[in-house]
Image (spheres, rainbow, N blue to C red):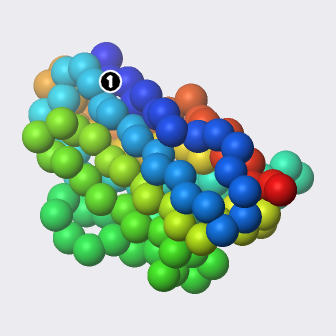
Amino acid sequence: QVQLVESGGGLVQPGGSLRLSCAASGSISTIYVMAWYRQAPGKQRELVAQIVSNSNGNYADSVKGRFTISRDNAKNTVYLQMDSLKPEDTAVYYCNALIRSFNRGASDYWGQGTQVTVSS
């Protein structure tokens, strides 16, 4: 069984920073892609950033230059550094990963979500 556990959400003022973490655990053989999505109230879930192994990340236009995604492969962990936060960044942020486990083929996994609120 594979699990993704997120941490680091919270309340921050506009212009502030937060760092999200997501650790994958369980019977993991290979992690191909790790990503962050977000879903604001009344809106569809959208891709924020994704990273493949040690490559550079890909970002949604709305967060380019403000957010940075990174991975620690030794810890099976992905991070999202969020700077210059805006009220429109308020959403539930979800970790996502494409993982091959030892007892099944590659599957898509999701974390439980962490709330990020940007407000003065």
Give SS at disc 1: strand
Disc 1 marks which residue? Answer: 2
Q: Nearer the viewer, residue 94 or 15?
A: 15
Can residue 91 be seen at all in this image of the molecule? no
Q: x, y percentage for residue 67? A: 48, 69
Residue shown at 15% from the left, 46% from the top = 73
Point 60% across, 71% down: residue: 84
Question: Which quadrant of the figure contains the C terminus?
Answer: bottom right
Q: Is residue 48 above or below residue 93?
A: below
Q: How many marks?
A: 1
Where's the N terminus, which quadrant? top left
Residue found 81% across the figure and 55% down from its top: 119
Q: Residues within 10 Å of mark 1 (few under 14, many from 20)?
A: some
Based on the displayed image, in which of its 4 quarters is residue 56 positioned? bottom left
Give amino acid for label 1: Val
| Residue 1 shown left or right of residue 119 in the figure | left
Considering only vertical position in the picture, is 28 above or below 42? above
- Front-most of residues 106 and 87: 87
Observer able to see residue 118: yes
The foreground one among 100 and 48 is 48
| Residue 32: percent from left, percent from top | 23, 52
| Residue 89 placement, left or right of 110 | right
Residue 71 place in picture, x, y as percent? 25, 53
* Residue at image point 60% right, 47% down: 93
Find the residue positioned furthest to the right: 42
* Residue 14 image offset from top left, x and y in percent: 72, 64
